[in-house]
Amino acid sequence: MKTVAENKVEGRSGHAVFCADIGGSFIKFAVSPAPGVLMPLERVATPAMDWDAFAASIADLLSRHERAAPLSAPLALSIAGLVDPQSGLATSANIPCITGRRLAKELTSSLGRRVVAANDADCLTLAEANEGAGRGHPIVFCAVMGTGIGGGLAVDGRLLRGAGGVTGEWGHGPILNTTVEIEGKVLHIPRFSCGCGQAGCVDTVGGARGIERLHLFLHGQNDTSHQILERWQAGDEEARKTVSVYLELVGDPLAVAVNTTGASIVPVGGGLASSTLLIEALDLAVRARILNRFDRPLVVPAARQDDGGLVGAAVLGHQLVLSVKGE
């Protein structure tokens, strides 16, 4: 992260913004006095079931820290859910009270300051494109690989947000192969049912629960993703087979995403990004499948894994300030 002085030298906006990373359990609250500078302020429980309590919690945070930024400072939110950029409607399984609400518009009205909101995967994408592994890359495709699969796309440091706010969501759509060839043997893999209502989505095999599902199908064992990856790294044959199948199934659609977007870097966030060896193996699988051959790593662990929501929200807030100023 840069200092305030360095940002002034670059001539970037020095207007402060408040930012919050809102998950189903906690709200992380911070202020960004200038682009590239983040000052965490507080963490409180998320009133996930009660809209009035949710809005009051946000108002209380702003009131307690009002001296940290001017009254005109906007508030930028990273939300564990979808935010439709056209209608402004929010949808969240983890924060039910915001579902069906025009989140930014309603909070702007009640708080008396500009509010902007985006999906947490989109905020991680913004963080990586501006202050992380994707800095300096014109097109950044961010892959989130945690419990399930998500993603986001940034062009020239700004989010590309399509209809419904689902740009970069490579985790859904019936696109998985049903056969995998491992060591000369063809394995038939079913199109597992997905929570989105379809079958054969990357989400069904690509995240932590997906690895576990594959391992159960292949070996009849109910092991956790951590156990499977630990055994794979230790040379266990059954775990090796599971990970080999995993790389075949997930490498294909991620390569399609790279070919389609033209991304020159793919930062990976989420719990699976903590397995460096898995990400390195996925990188090799993807680079073997794409048209543009890279002689350097393409799929890499996200640099802003721990604070990506707040950093991305701060970037979103500063971009709002610049757009209002016409810069």
Image (cartoon, rainbow, N blue to C red):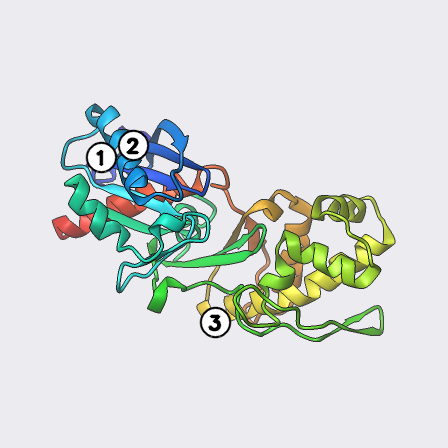
- Dividing the picture into quadrants, the one containing residue 291 is bottom right
Percent x, y for residue 189? 74, 71
Residue 34 seen by the camera = no
Cβ atoms at labels 2 and 3 below 8 Å apart: no
Is 240 positioned to the left or the right of 25 in the image? Answer: right
Q: Residue, x 70% and y 61% (percent of image)?
A: 246
Depth check: give the residue in front, 281 or 314.
314
Residue 125 seen by the camera = yes
Q: Secondary structure at mark 3?
A: helix
Q: CA distance from mark 1 to mark 3?
A: 36 Å
| Location of mark 2 (residue) | 31
Q: Secondary structure at mark 1?
A: loop
Q: CA distance from mark 1 to mark 2?
A: 7 Å
- Which is closer to the viewer, label 2 or label 3? 2
Mark linked to residue 260: 3
- Dividing the picture into quadrants, the one containing residue 174 is bottom right
Q: Residues within 10 Å of mark 1 (few under 14, many from 20)?
A: many
Task: Identify which amino acid the numbered label 1 is placed on.
Answer: Ala
| Location of mark 1 (residue) | 16
Task: Identify which amino acid the numbered label 2 is placed on.
Answer: Val
Q: Residues within 10 Å of mark 3 (few under 14, many from 20)?
A: few
Q: Earlier in the sequence, mark 1 or mark 3?
A: 1
- Which is closer to the viewer, label 1 or label 3? 1
Residue 105, compared with residue 249, is above or below; it is above
Percent x, y for residue 59? 24, 34
Task: Identify which amino acid the numbered label 3 is placed on.
Answer: Thr
Q: Secondary structure at mark 2?
A: strand
Is 45 positioned to the left or the right of 315 in the image? Answer: right
Cβ atoms at labels 1 and 2 below 8 Å apart: yes
Depth check: give the residue in front, 102 or 36.
102
